Amino acid sequence: METITLPGGQLTTAELSAIFATIPVEFDFIDDHDIVRWSSANRHRLFARTDADLGKPVRAVHPGHSQARVQAVLDQMHAGKRGKLSLLIHHQGQPVNIAFYALHDAAGKYLGCVEVTQPVADHQEKGGWWRNLKQMLLRH
């Protein structure tokens, strides 16, 4: 089994795949030419990505009303004017956080960005102490 060495340790490809399949967060990697190169394939996705989306410009996988804004953020990241952006939207009546993070190599060269999408309704519940206790005591 292939092992990947990263800062902080090593993972097998099976372990890394299991992490991305389990965490209820969407990850999309957009390369330095604004092309979608990888998406986490898990059952938790709010915004579907298929193998057909790989290799497409990132604007092509976003709805028309957001394409210009997505491109503007990426242009700012290319220019080094922005390192991240976090937005709260509502999707199907639920709050969702969408964040873009610029990625750079050790020399500072722009490698692309990762788009991270996560439902946050559970994080915004009132009574957080009680919710946390219930999660610790009850098995899901």
Image: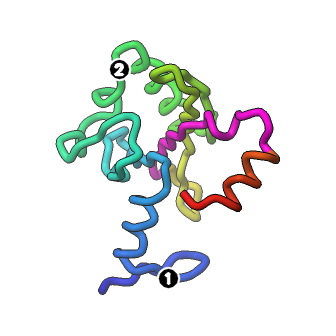
Identify the residue at horizontal 61%, vertical 33% (top origin): 121
2 drawn magenta: no
Pointer 2 residue:
63
Q: Which residue is mark 1?
A: 10
Q: Which quarter shows the N terminus? A: bottom left
Residue farthest top in this picture = 65
Which comes before the other along the chain, label 1 or label 2? Answer: 1
Q: CA distance from mark 1 to mark 2?
A: 37 Å
**Colour treatment of the image:** rainbow
Coordinates of residue 56 in the picture (x, y in percent): 24, 37
Residue 27: percent from left, percent from top:
44, 48
Q: Secondary structure at mark 1?
A: strand
Give the vertical position of 18 relative to 97 (above or below). below
Q: Is residue 66 left or right of residue 14?
A: right
Q: Secondary structure at mark 2?
A: loop
Residue 57 point in image, percent of width and height: 29, 34
Residue 26 is left or right of residue 73, and the answer is: left
- Please indicate whether residue 124 sits to the left or right of residue 49 in the image: right
Question: Which image quadrant is residue 20 in?
Answer: bottom left
Neighbour tally class for label 1: few under 14, some 14-19, many 20 plus, Cα within 10 Å: few
49 or 82: nearer the viewer: 49
Residue 80 in the image: x percent, y percent? 60, 39
Residue bounds of the magenta highlight: 111-128
Residue type for callout 2: Pro
Quadrant location, the C terminus: bottom right
- Name the kind of residue labelled 1 in the image: Gln
Residue contact at pointers 1 and 2, CB within 8 angstroms: no
Relative height, residue 41 to residue 73 (above, below): below
